[in-house]
Amino acid sequence: MLHGKRILLIVGGGIAAYKSLELIRLVQKAGGTVTPVLTRAGAEFVTPLSVSALAGAKVYTDLFDLTDEAEMGHIQLSRAADLLVVAPATADLMAKMAGGRADDLASTLLLATDKRVLVAPAMNVRMWTHPATQRNLAVLRDDGVLTVGPNEGDMACGEYGPGRMAEPAEIVAAIAAALGGGPLAGKHVIVTSGPTHEPIDPVRYIANRSSGAQGTAIAAALRDLGARVTFVTGPAVMPAPSGVTVVAVQTAHDMATAVAVALPADAAVMAAAVADWRVANATGQKMKKDGSGKAPVLEFAENPDILVTVSKGPGRPRLVVGFAAETDDVVAHATAKRLRKGCDWIVANDVSADTGIMGGTENAVTLISDAGSEVWPRMSKTEVARRLAARIAGALA
Ligand code: CTP
């Protein structure tokens, strides 16, 4: 199940640390290898010797251990693995991760990695349900961190409730899912996202208010279901998610080319707010005031419609999903747009200024397909993305 997979296992401090020994054994039994990292607190619960003996590998503990750095720098250590697993993940470790701290080896590896991270929280029930921990959890999930557990039950501290670390076998299953065992495993999905910038001259451009938040969340949700995602993004505010192939572009033209290069795909989700027009008389030098008081006149040329090209062109993905940004008669316009553009589904949203949707964290969408239109309640863009990804998985099954 984990044949040839390399797991960097960070063992945090907590009574559940003893279960990480069993976890090491099960990962190895499933064909994977484990590079163990013990936090200072973790080493209070399990000894470096027992961890390294079981893993059959050196255990890393200290960021400033020069021998470790000489053998393998922390950046390399954080990237040589296929997946980072934090088990047990304490409240403190989760807070550090959510805050982007890097003050010891474990937190530095977690910040420096370009790989997915799976955390198995384990803590006292009050600590788990505390708003601060729940807030940190929400931040981590939004960052694309995967979680397994905690489970409910009797705790070592004598209390009962959620907080027990997931069982090692559950963690191994979650590792397998994170490494490509999800419903979209083996599927390639292209996602376009963000605005485009259409140059006027070398220092000026025409853009729009898209932050890229919805497209970014969709790419992350598809990735979480196991898809291989090519994320073609304009200059967005939101950073691209980890674990996807990022193709950064500026203009609609670049975006069209990048999408053509990324084909074939099983599905395409066109969430980008592509500029319909580019400046035909853009200049290679900065436009100067000539003192005459005469305003420059910009001429426009129509950009290629990427959604139409993909929907009606050769090598059409099985499922093509467009977006419709409308400010009035949302469903009527979006329904007509679906037919005109030839895509299977349209995710329609009202981007009128008073909705706060463009550039905001929430979205209220209507999913339009040949089966009609389905109004979704207002929810976070992350949740819209999760639902849409689940639908896509259903359609491609
Ligand atoms: N789109 C695209 N290429 C373009 C313009 C739009 O791929 N040159 C895609 C968007 O990514 C989105 C869908 O088409 O999935 C609809 O975008 P939208 O801006 O709502 O529509 P427009 O094509 O601009 O149509 P209109 O001007 O009529 O609103």
Image: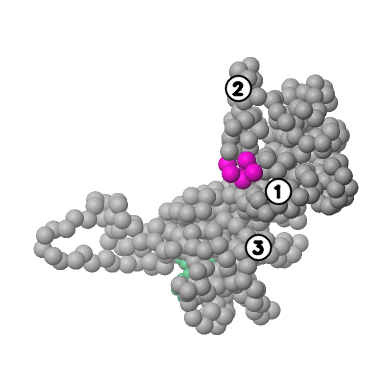
What separation in Å lies between label 1 and label 3 (alpha carbons)?
Answer: 15 Å
Taking the spot 27% from the left edge, 61% from the top edge, the residue there is: 281
Q: Do the residues labelled 1 and 3 touch (CB within 8 Å)?
A: no
In the depicted structure, whether residue 336 falls above or below residue 397: below
In this view of the protein, can residue 348 be seen by the observer? yes
Taking the spot 61% from the left edge, 64% from the top edge, the residue there is: 380
Task: Give coordinates of residue 210: x percent, y percent.
Answer: 47, 62
Amino acid on which the number 1 mark rests in the picture: Leu
- Residue at numbered disc 2: 64
Taking the spot 49% from the left edge, 81% from the top edge, the residue there is: 328
Residue at the farthest top position: 67
As drawn, is 187 to the left or to the right of 354? right
Residue 383's label in the rendered image is 3
As drawn, is 377 to the left or to the right of 309? right
- Residue at numbered disc 1: 146
**Which is closer to the viewer, label 2 or label 1?**
2
In this view of the protein, can residue 173 be seen by the observer? no
The verdict on residue 384 being magenta is no
As drawn, is 354 to the left or to the right of 243? left
Which span is picked out in magenta? 95-100
Mark 2 secondary-structure assignment? loop
Amino acid on which the number 2 mark rests in the picture: Phe
Q: In which quarter of the image is residue 343?
A: bottom right
Q: Quick one: 282 or 11, which is closer to the camera?
A: 11
Mark 3 secondary-structure assignment? helix
In the depicted structure, whether residue 137 falls above or below residue 43: below
Query: Magenta stretch: dominant SS?
Result: helix
Q: Earlier in the sequence, mark 1 or mark 3?
A: 1
Amino acid on which the number 3 mark rests in the picture: Glu
Q: Earlier in the sequence, mark 2 or mark 1?
A: 2
In the depicted structure, whether residue 349 falls above or below residue 82: below
